[in-house]
Amino acid sequence: MSSEPHVISEVSGGVGTVTLNRPEKMNAFFGSMRDEIADALEGMAEREDVRVVIVTGRGRAFCTGADVGYMADLLDREAYDEANALVTAGRRVIGAITSMPKPVIGSVNGPAAGGGANLALACDLRIASDRASIGQTFNRIGLHPDWGGTWLLPRLVGRARAAELFFFGEMIGAEDAARIGLFNRVVPHDELAATTRDWAERLVAKPALPLALAKRAIRISDGSSLEEMLDYEADAQDSCFRSDDAMEGTRAFVEKRAPNFGAGR
């Protein structure tokens, strides 16, 4: 058995990377791995030197959801409290991504199934390898979607398409997934890491505050009226007006030079 950690955290140039590291099992979750992912993400959220976060998998898969053998053992033992604790841990992972005031990029390097699919969908942006696939495979093993899929998927593809994906539980290829809005971009497999890093570095160069406020606006807009969003925009813009980055950005525009944004304060 490998002594390597099942979740690896790295930081370089303002970019934090969280890598699922159980390649021999296609990065399937087991044991405390879900909590380890949440710990890593929450750590990235707290670090001032991290402006953008990448989530990816090592090996040929992004993440294939729960380790079915591990899950079968829990159910055989009727260890329902332990099984339910896994769902609670997954909720913590999704909450860490969606509440983080930083862009999170899912770099989908291979199959993303079940909870792994919804881990990808929780990310703000998703770049996929042309070898990737994604599917809501829960009912193949008699289970219901979790990890936020019932909220995320209908908002990305609409109710009818979400029903199709949930009911049939089929894996769909990268290009089809991009066509219906599950992936932002599909690139050749050998270009995935470089493309993801390029996107991350471009976002690092952006002012942090407008990105954080825009991320929150996207999340709350579904449950808000136009008037409520206009109010939110006014408050957000006032915060930006008062920031050093707005001063720098407007001066740079007038002076015809590239802006040098700081921490967005």
Image: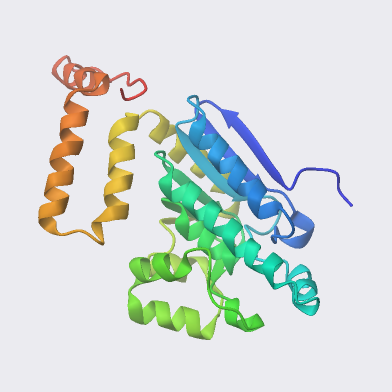
In depth, the one of 68 and 84 nearer the eye is 84
Query: From the viewer's perspective, is residue 162 above or below residue 218?
Result: below
**Image quadrant assignment for residue 213:** top left
- Please state the total of marks drawn on the protein image: 0
Q: Which residue is the extreme one toward the right?
A: 1
Q: Tell me where residue 73 appears, x and y as whole percent.
A: 80, 73
Residue 225 in sight? yes
| Observer able to see residue 129 | no
Instruction: Residue at 55% x, 60% y: name it.
Output: 130
Which residue is located at x 40 percent, y 67 percent? 151
Quarter of the figure with residue 247: top left
Q: On the picture, is 42 further left or further right than 256?
A: right
Q: Residue furthest top?
A: 255
Q: Residue furthest front?
A: 81
Write the residue at 15% across / 59% down: 225
- Residue 17 to residue 59: above or below: above
Tell me where residue 20 appears, x and y as whole percent: 67, 50
**Residue 226 location (% of width, % of height):** 12, 57
Question: In the depicted view, which residue is nearer to us: 221 or 132?
Answer: 221
Residue found 62% across the figure and 48% down from its top: 37
The one of 100 and 190 positioned closer to us in this rendering: 100
Nearer-the-camera pick, 105 or 36: 36
The answer to whether residue 189 is left or right of residue 212 is right
